[in-house]
Amino acid sequence: MSDDSKSIHEFDFNLICDYFASIERQGPGSPEVTIKALSFIDNLTDESRIADIGCGTGGQTRVLALHAPGQITGIDLFPAFIDLFNQNAKQLNLDDRMKGIVGSMENLPFQEEELDLIWSEGAIYNIGFERGLHDWRRFLKTGGYLAVSEASWFTPTRPAEIDEFWQDAYPEIDTIPQKVEHLQNAGYMPIATFVLPENCWTDHFYEPQISVQKSFMKKYAGNKNAQELVITQRHEAELYSKYKAYYGYVFYIGKKI
Ligand code: SAH
């Protein structure tokens, strides 16, 4: 494959890690939204087992650890993110509550019915929403919760430019009622859904990237992959600002029945 046809998923892992490691979050979200989603979960105790799947460097995991009881295991494919996850946890004296491990969401290292809560912000798309709901369910106790955020359409139809962008990036993007139906069909009682506010994309995701992009362009001057990564991220930010009435991230919270 030539460099020209690379998608974000095919960029050099080290470049992606370097780019995203210095920002608090690797996807749209905010501490307020994590706390709001947590407000729908009512089964947690100090004995609870929680998994944060696709945890990245653990921005949302630290919020979970500060606002919920129980032991949290963060899992991510990228070792560099997990190193940062564990360093940050230690610095904040949260390392007795949260532990990061390298692993894949396609092959989770849990026992059947071990977990009280499965958390995943901006990451389930990597396995696909329907497959993730189905495959992860067996690790939850009956009555356990799943809370995931997922790209969703806000309207039944939308302009061709943004529709084509998402059909290429993630064809499983769908409307909120369809996503809720998938949640129900996968064996969860739908408990809550809410749309992430715009500041999760702007203040917490795209704006922190602006200074990273500047230093990244200098550090990797002449590196075509690095330049393309920046261009791709800038393009996504522009699309968001143009079409934010049509799509965004939505939290879906379900209870295993
Ligand atoms: N939850 C974090 C990160 C979201 S970005 C946040 O909201 O800030 C998506 C994360 O999924 C990345 O950290 C990426 O490394 C991870 N990821 C991608 N494929 C994965 C897989 N197969 N298994 C586990 N993690 C994966």
Image (cartoon, rainbow, N blue to C red):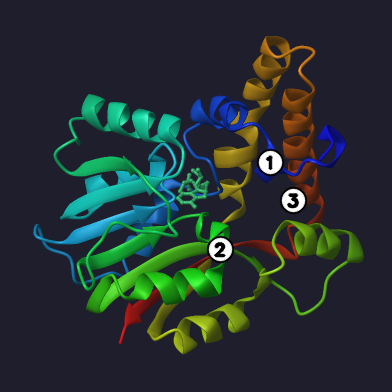
Asked whether residue 196 appears in the rendered view, the answer is no
Q: Residue at x 61, y 77 (%)?
A: 176
Q: CA distance from mark 1 to mark 3?
A: 22 Å
Q: Crowding at label 3, few (<14), some or many (≥20) Cα neighbours within 10 Å?
A: some
Query: Which residue is under mark 2?
Result: 150
Quarter-of-image position of residue 179: bottom right
> Amino acid under label 1?
Glu
175, above or below 19, in the image: below
Q: Which mark is residue 240?
A: 3
Q: Amino acid at mark 3?
A: Tyr
Q: Is residue 228 left or right of residue 196?
A: right
Instruction: Tell which residue pokes out farthest to the right in this image.
Output: 160
Where residue 75 appears, x then y in whole percent?
A: 36, 48
Residue 10 numbered tag: 1
Assign the C terminus to one quadrant of the image. Answer: bottom left
The location of residue 256, given as percent across then percent down, is: 31, 81
Q: Position of residue 84 (x, y in %)?
A: 37, 29
Circle 2: residue type: Glu
Q: CA distance from mark 3 to mark 2?
A: 15 Å
Secondary structure beneath dot 3 equals helix
Foreground tag (1 vs 3): 1
Q: Which comes sooner in the sequence, label 1 or label 3?
A: 1
Q: Residue furthest left?
A: 47
* CA distance for labels 1 and 2: 21 Å
